[in-house]
Image: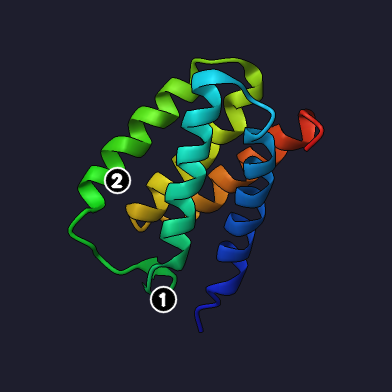
């Protein structure tokens, strides 16, 4: 039996921690991180089938935006790296790759711990 709560809980926990981190960023980094958080919250609210997102017509545009934001955040200061990892977790979520999503959430959590969040 599939247990969807565990991966989604991990996703939600790092999401809230990145939201706290985003407040401490400045300029474009903050805007990009806040947008990643906003998109992730939208994804968490969407319907799922066995843990995977139900398809939506706007998913291709979301993938493009998350890819761009993750790339930009990954090139910024080390403090923005957890937001980049969260964006990659969201991309895996959109792609239905629950294993990669969990790996990116773990990566995000480790980066947050290193930064004291």
Residue name at image x 50 percent, y 79 percent: 2
Q: Which mark is residue 50?
A: 1
Furthest residue to the bottom?
Answer: 1
Dot 2 falls on a residue whose secondary structure is helix
- Looking at the image, tell me whether mark 2 or mark 1 is earlier in sequence order: 1
Residue name at image x 37 percent, y 73 percent: 47
Q: Position of residue 77 (x, y in %)?
A: 60, 15
Q: Is 89 placed left or right of 22 in the picture?
A: left
**Image position of 43 with respect to 19: above or below:** below
Q: Quadrant of the C terminus?
A: top right
Q: Position of residue 31 (x, y in %)?
A: 49, 30
Q: Which residue is mark 2?
A: 62
Residue name at image x 27 percent, y 37 percent: 64
Q: Nearer the viewer, residue 39 or 11?
A: 39
Q: Position of residue 17 (x, y in %)?
A: 69, 45
- The reply to whether callout 2 and callout 1 are in contact (CB within 8 Å) is no
Q: Is 11 placed left or right of 87 in the picture?
A: right
Residue name at image x 30 percent, y 69 percent: 54
């Amino acid at each position: 039996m599939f247990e969807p709560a565990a991966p989604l809980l991990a996703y939600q926990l790092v999401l809230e921690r990145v939201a706290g981190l985003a407040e401490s960023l400045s300029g474009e980094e903050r805007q990009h991180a806040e947008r990643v958080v906003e998109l992730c919250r939208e994804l968490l609210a969407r319907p799922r089938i066995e843990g995977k997102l139900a398809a939506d017509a706007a998913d291709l545009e979301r993938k493009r935006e998350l890819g761009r934001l993750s790339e930009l955040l990954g090139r910024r200061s080390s403090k923005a790296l957890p937001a980049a990892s969260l964006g990659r977790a969201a991309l895996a979520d959109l792609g239905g790759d629950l294993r990669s999503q969990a790996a990116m959430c773990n990566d995000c959590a480790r980066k947050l711990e290193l930064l004291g969040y």
